[in-house]
Structure formats: C-alpha cells, structure tokens
Image (cartoon, rainbow, N blue to C red):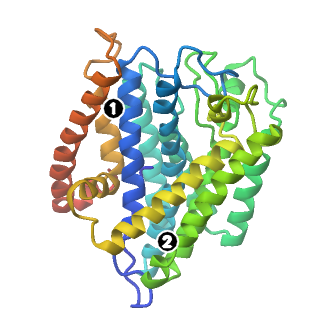
Amino acid sequence: MVQQTVQITESPTRLSSRLQFIDFARGLVMILMAWDHASNFWMDVHGGLEGIYAFRNPAMDFTMFMARFVSHWCAPTFVFLSGVSLALSVNRRVARGDGDWEITSHIVIRGLLLLIFEALIVSPAFDLPYLYFGVIAAIGVGLILFSVGRKLPTSVILAVSLIVILNQQWLDLSFIPMDVAWGHYLRRILAEPGFSWRPYFALYPVIPWVGVMGLGWVFGTFLHNNDRERIMGLKLPLAATGVASIATFFAMRLLNGYGNLVRRWSNDILDWLYISKYPPSVAFLLVTLGGTCLFMALGILIEERGWSRKNISGAVHQFGRLPLFFYLTHLWLYRLRLPKVPRPFPLDLWQTLGLWTVGLAVLWVLCSRYEILKRRYPRFLRYI
C-alpha cells in the first residue's frame, strides 16, 4: 500500500517510464479507503471485524453493508502493489549498480519506519494501543522479510506465496502459549488476529499477508522483464483473470466449505458477501484480488487513452503516486479531533459522503503541494 512505483532505466527493451496503471489502481482504492475511515470515524453503524465476528451486524441494511464491502478491495490491493513496487524498485537499484547491502538496508529502514508510523501516527488515530498491528505494520514486516527473501528464485517465491494463501486456514500455532503476553501477541501478529488482550491487538497477521505481497513481487518481476508494449497488452488478460477470480469466489461460497472461514448460513446476498477479512480467507482474496486485476486493466485502458493526467483521473493517479503521505494524512484529516477525544455527534450517510468528498478535495491540494516538495527534496522525503 505504501511503496512507490518507480522507474526502470535499463535498455530501451525494458521499462523506461512510470507504470501509471499501477498508480491508478492504488489511487482508486485509496479513495475507497478514505470513505471507509470517514464512515468509521463519524457514523453509528460501520461494520468491520469481518471474520472475528462469525455473523454480520444485523443493524446494517443493504446500503450500509455495501458501503463497507467496497472497502475490502483496499488492503489486498495495497499489499499486492507493495510487492509489485518493491520488485520494480529492487530491480532498478540492481540495474544501476547499487550494492547488495545498500539495497537491503534501504528496504529494512523503510520497513522499520512503517512500524514506527503505525505505532505513533496510525494507532492513535483509531484510539488503539501503540502495539496495535495493522496493515502498515504488516507491510513493514513484509518488507523486512523480503530484504532477505528477495534473493530467492521467483518461482520459489510464487510457490511459497500460493502455499501460504491456500493453506493458511489449517495453520496450527497451538504450540505457542496463548496465556502469556509474548505468546498471545506472537500468535496474533503471525496468523490469529484479535483484540481480546489489551494492548496486544492485531488485525493484519503477517503470514497470510506476506503471501499476498509475494504474489505482488512475482508480478512486479514480470513487469520488469518485459517492455511497455507487452505490458500494455495485459489489459485483456488482467480483466479475464479478474472476472475468473470473482467467479471462483462465488463457486467457493456456493460449496460453503474450503476457503470460507465464515460460512454462509443463508442464500441472502449479504451472507454471500460476508467473508473473513481478519484473517483473509481464500474467498476474500479471490474477490478482492480479482477486483485488483480489474482496476489494473482499467488503469491500462486509461493510460492508453492518455487520460492519466486529466480531470478526476489525474487526481486518482496523484493519490496513487503518494500512498504513504495520503494514508498518514487522511486519517487525521477525517478524524478531525485529538486522540482520545470522543466523537461529538454522529453523521448520517449523506453527511458522511459530503465530508468524504470535501476531504478528497483537501487531500488533492495537500498531495499536489507535497509532490512538489518531494521533487525538491527527494533525499529527505524518499521514504514518505
């Protein structure tokens, strides 16, 4: 979610400019994420904790349920594209002759900074303890793991990632004690999210999400090894993959067995769509990463038409170019109050939509100013 797509400056047969469709896909889900957090901060009914709760909130009608559901595409897209961007970044550095230690230390520093940002900026925004392990922390740990794991063959990374994703529901960590603080927290951050023992809260465990990052790494490596013409030709294959993935999701929900950490208990469409995000089930990743493929296909179409810097599409791309700055800024922009200060009053759906829209306009201005600043001081601002 938070890595920057970078340029590859090898021979003319390789990538020579920024992949704008990656920015578009990331920017699009960041806009959805802003909606999710705005509603979380200001509405009485928001949903969330899908998977930790075995049943959906009965207070949510169809509109509110879908308003929450659309945000499910955010975390998988962020994590997947973090792997894509990491692969592009590492290959660029190798191509220009950077040393192995320099590359490794850069990745580790970025990962550690994400952990610090999670504790000091993200957790207080949600009134959570500083040990809360969220999506930024999961990506940070994933980066640290890939600072070493990147040396493995791409085929091995692909195989391990698929094994982790397809089999993580059977992972047994019972050998780690749950009644002591260190064991409880370790199990939470590895594979068993929960919030039963403060401050040892975790919602984005490392094991399943590093598998998603691994898939991104493989795709990013593929992009690096191909020229722009072939990459632009991925529009239809990505769209077909997205449709097939979402169709497989419905087939898996119909069978109501493997891949469904939350079982469907009726044929109501909302029960079909109530799937485990914490941890991400196979069904959850099928529908969300399928959506990611569709977003990238749409991004390629927009890039082909030359719309990447025009009107609303230009703002979406700009958000996607500055993911970490957007993420850290939007939380406090939409919260609009200091830590531990309760919400003064609730907003209804339409009021929250208005707040979300105004916030996006403010974020566009802030991102525009920050992008200029980052170009002026790239050495000091390269990690944000």
Q: In the image as oriented, which residue stretches furthest toward the bottom?
A: 12
Dot 1, crowdedness within 10 Å: few (<14), some or many (≥20)? many
- SS class, disc 2: helix
* Residue 326 or residue 121, whichever sits in front: 326
* Residue 85 or residue 304, whichever sits in front: 304
Question: Is residue 131 at all visible to an observer of this figure?
Answer: no
Q: Which residue is mark 2?
A: 235
Q: Position of residue 381 (x, y in %)?
A: 26, 54
- SS class, disc 1: helix
Q: Is residue 166 left or right of residue 367?
A: right
Q: Position of residue 64 (x, y in %)?
A: 47, 25
Q: Amino acid at mark 1?
A: Leu
The disc label shown at residue 171, or none:
none
Q: Residue at x 35, y 22 (%)?
A: 349
Calculate the distance from the C-alpha at mark 2 to the C-alpha at mark 1: 33 Å
Q: Which residue is mark 1?
A: 331
Q: Position of residue 266 (x, y in %)?
A: 74, 26
For residue 266, above or below residue 22: above
Dot 2, crowdedness within 10 Å: few (<14), some or many (≥20)? many
For residue 338, above or below residue 384: above
